[in-house]
């Protein structure tokens, strides 16, 4: 079970996205990813098309698309086109949407979490079927699709990552996705972007056990993904962790153990990720820092 490492670009224009994509490929990242937000940022699929033109090997992913911004049939067509354009390098990341301020800006109804997650589940099944080359008819709670087909992607199987929380959504992801990304974040705060952190290790123990159980019951194996919220290279790991613990009201032991933070020297971060993989089986990590994290990739490559 080898590590995979993704870089999520924070660039605000396409030139910056392309620069980040090239740098990520040179640094040894496996996946280059962009987010999906309403506002002054770049379009995720168009910017990944530009990144495809300036890279050769790195996988191109979305982390994550807001399901409510696109109909799944239309999205599947765009993803298949991007996969062909990139010579089979696409990884689809999709989530239920969370930023109520962005929904308001776009004039979209912001449904309760349970409804958005149910709609995501329907969408994942439709996208999976279409990307697998099936002529698709689907009648779900939120979408009705009749005899839909799309362009065949380059890959025989385009991987799907689902980022979500909650028992039912996670179980559905374990049955239908290739990669499950429990966000371990709570309610969206007043700015519409930041969240409460739920990084208690006991909570993650239960979550991973639940995902594994759902996958096993379906006769499947899924990869687990963690989006690292901060990479802090420091010789005083404990001091940085204490500051985070105070800021978020989380136990110091949980801050030091969570896979959603990478703190310490490069060697300490490498050891931390090895411990996380051993405890939770998480093998796929995305960060937002190239230079700070590149030595960790070198250290853990092939381990």
Image: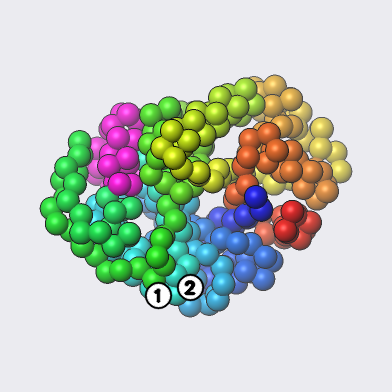
Residue pictured at 44% horizontal, 70% vertical: 88
Q: Could you tell me residue 281's position as x and y percent?
A: 63, 40
- Mark carried by residue 59: none
Residue located beneath label 2 in the image: 52
Residue located beneath label 1 in the image: 85
Closer-to-camera residue (75/134): 134
Q: In the rendered structure, are the residues bearing label 2 and label 1 in contact, judged by CB atoms less than 8 Å apart?
A: yes
Closer-to-camera residue (220/155): 220
Label 2 CA crowd tier, 10 Å (few <14, some 14–19, many 20+) = many
Q: Could you tell me residue 186's position as x and y percent?
A: 49, 28
Q: Could you tell me residue 143's position as x and y percent?
A: 19, 44
Query: Is residue 112 covered in magenta?
Result: yes
Residue pictured at 63% horizontal, 55% vertical: 5
Residue interval drawn in magenta: 101-125
Q: Residue furthest front?
A: 219
- In space, the residues marked 2 and 1 are separated at their CA atoms by 7 Å
Left or right? Give the position of 301 relative to 77.
right
Quarter of the picture containing the C terminus is bottom right
Q: Is residue 163 above or below residue 257?
A: below
Residue pictured at 63% horizontal, 65% vertical: 24
Q: Is residue 291 above or below residue 184?
A: below
């Amino acid at each position: 079970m080898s590590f995979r490492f993704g870089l999520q670009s924070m660039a605000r224009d396409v030139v910056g996205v392309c620069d980040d994509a090239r740098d990520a490929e040179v640094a040894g990242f496996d996946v280059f990813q962009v987010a999906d937000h309403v506002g002054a940022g770049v379009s995720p699929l168009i910017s990944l098309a530009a990144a495809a033109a300036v890279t050769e090997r790195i996988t191109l992913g979305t982390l994550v698309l807001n399901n409510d911004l696109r109909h799944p049939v239309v999205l599947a067509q765009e993803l298949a086109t991007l996969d062909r354009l990139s010579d089979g390098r696409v990884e689809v990341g999709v989530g239920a949407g969370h930023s109520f301020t962005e929904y308001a800006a776009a004039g979209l109804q912001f449904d309760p979490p349970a409804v958005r997650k149910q709609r995501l589940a329907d969408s994942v099944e439709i996208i999976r079927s279409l990307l697998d080359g099936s002529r698709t008819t689907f009648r779900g709670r939120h979408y009705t699709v009749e005899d839909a087909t799309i362009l065949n992607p380059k890959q025989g199987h385009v991987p799907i990552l689902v980022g979500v929380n909650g028992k039912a959504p996670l179980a559905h992801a374990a049955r239908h996705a290739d990669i499950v990304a429990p966000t371990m974040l709570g309610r969206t705060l007043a700015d519409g972007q930041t969240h409460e952190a739920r990084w208690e290790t006991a909570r993650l123990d239960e979550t991973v056990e639940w995902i594994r159980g759902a996958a096993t019951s379906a006769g499947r194996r899924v990869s687990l993904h963690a989006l690292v919220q901060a990479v802090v290279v420091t010789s005083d790991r404990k001091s940085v962790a204490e500051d985070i613990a105070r800021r978020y009201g989380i136990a110091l032991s949980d801050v030091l153990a969570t896979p959603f933070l990478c703190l310490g020297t490069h060697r300490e971060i490498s050891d931390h990720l090895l411990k996380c993989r051993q405890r939770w089986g998480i093998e796929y990590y995305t960060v937002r820092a190239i230079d700070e994290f590149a030595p960790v990739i070198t250290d853990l490559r092939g381990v």
